[in-house]
Structures are given as C-alpha cells and as structure tokens.
Image (spheres, rainbow, N blue to C red):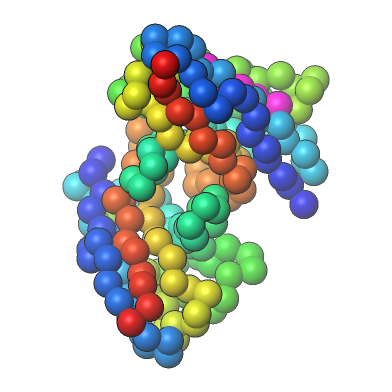
Amino acid sequence: IRMTQSPSSFSASTGNRVTITCRASQGISSYLAWYQQKPGKAPKLLIYAVSTLQSGVPSRFSGSGSGTDFTLTISCLQSEDFATYYCQQYYNYPYTFGQGTKLEIK
Amino acid sequence: QLQLQESGPGLVEPSETLSLICNVSGGSISSSSYYWGWIRQPPGKGLEWIGNIYYSGSTYYNPSLETRVTISIDTSKNQFSLKLSSVTAADTAVYHCARLNSLGYYFDYWGQGTLVTVSS
C-alpha cells in the first residue's frame, strides 16, 4: 500500500493552524498512525487508529479521516512542533510510511 | 519506562552481513501484548519497515528484503536481533528497533537508532 503525504514541506508561523494530508493507495480502514521526528532523534508516536492521541501528546494535535484519506492537524503551532511528520498504515503487511512532511519555521 | 537500545558495528563491508542487537529494558520482551520490530532510514530519506518478531519467534518480513533478512529473539537476555546479508551501499541507513502494540501494530516505543554505513 502506497502512502502519499502532502505537502512534502512547507513553512508556517507559531500560532498557525496547519493540516497535513496522507492518502493511501487503497482502503486501510482506521489502521493509520502519525509520527513526529526531529533531526537526529527517533520518531515519536503522536496518533494511532486515525484519531487516538498517544499518552502525553498535547491536545493541539488531532487526526481525522477514514478509508483512504487522512489528515493531521496542529491547531496552534508551537516552536517545538517544527519537525518532520510521517503517516504509517498498519492495515496489512508490508507496513508502509508516507514520504514525510517537513514543517519549517516561516 | 521502557527503553530500547540498538548496538552493533557502524561500518560493514559490501557483500557482508549487517548484524544489530536491540536491548530492551524497563519491560519484558516476553509479553504477549507486543511485537518487536526493525525500521530503517537512509540518510535524508524516509522510513522503511524491515520486519517484526513475536516473543514466540514468529516473524514477518518486508518482501523487498525477505531473502536477506533474519530477525531473532532471545527472551533470556531480553533482546532481539537483526541480520541483513549481502549488503550494498543502498543498505546504508539509521536502523531503529521499536515496539509494536499488538492492539494495533503501530510503533509506540523506539530506540534512538544506530547508523550503519556500508563501505569498503
């Protein structure tokens, strides 16, 4: 299953609301996760099952979607949110990730 | 707090076998609630799932790597390992080990990763 994220990169300012899109090449039900990765660090699980926030993740992060189209929204960007974000399907093997969306400071 | 730590050679020669170990602390690798996996990330690129293993020894591999990959588990040492044979420069990457929650098979804990360079 191919996972396609858009945009690949973009710039935003703190306080902005941003949305990242992830599209699956076939239906994946609700088996979608989102990760945040900062340079030199391991990815961090943000959201699983499309919209369930991992423990400790701020409520400004939210996820939505179903079937093939999904979104990650950050309601009010903070300085620590500038990172690369990946979606991942775990509907079936092989698990696949999107190519990543790099969020940079404007 | 669960911690995963990868270890192994940082440099492997072409055609040789890459071998890494993931040591798990703060939790039991024998829990029936989790799988354990490997993911890699070539420099400046995205994430690629390599494979998973269950405490029983059941494995699942990415078909793109299946002929060259072996993942094994040692419950007595609370660790699992990765072997990738016949490596080329294309296998140069940061290799992460991670835990998968068996409720959904997403990766909820990750090791910091170790860079393996394939070069002579």
Looking at the picture, tell me which residue is in the foreground, A20 or A52. Answer: A20
Locate residue B67 relative to residue B52 in the image: left or right.
left
Locate residue B13 relative to residue A21 in the image: left or right.
right
In the rendered image, residue B111, in percent from the top left (x then y), is placed at 61, 43
Looking at the picture, tell me which residue is in the foreground, A11 or B26. Answer: A11
Magenta stretch contains residue B81:
yes
In the rendered image, residue A47, in percent from the top left (x then y), is placed at 49, 62
Q: Residue at x 50, y 80 (%)?
A: A79
Q: Residue at x 71, y 19 (%)?
A: B74
Please say if A85 is above or below B118.
below
Magenta stretch contains residue B91:
no
Specify start and end residues of the magenta stretch as a single range. B79-83
Please say if A22 is above or below A2.
below
Residue A99 showing in the rendered view: yes
Locate residue B79 relative to residue B62 in the image: left or right.
right
User: What predominant SS class does the magenta segment belong to?
Assistant: strand
Q: Residue at x 48, y 73 (%)?
A: A81
In the rendered image, residue B1, in percent from the top left (x then y), is placed at 77, 52
Q: Quadrant of residue B41?
A: top left
Q: Quadrant of residue B23?
A: top right
Q: Residue at x 52, y 52 (%)?
A: A40
In the rendered image, residue B77, in percent from the top left (x then y), is placed at 78, 23
Which residue ends up furthest to the bottom in the rendered image?
A: A15
Which residue ends up furthest to the left in the rendered image?
A: A25
Residue A64 showing in the rendered view: no
Locate residue A103 relative to residue A81 in the image: left or right.
left
Q: Quadrant of residue B58?
A: top right
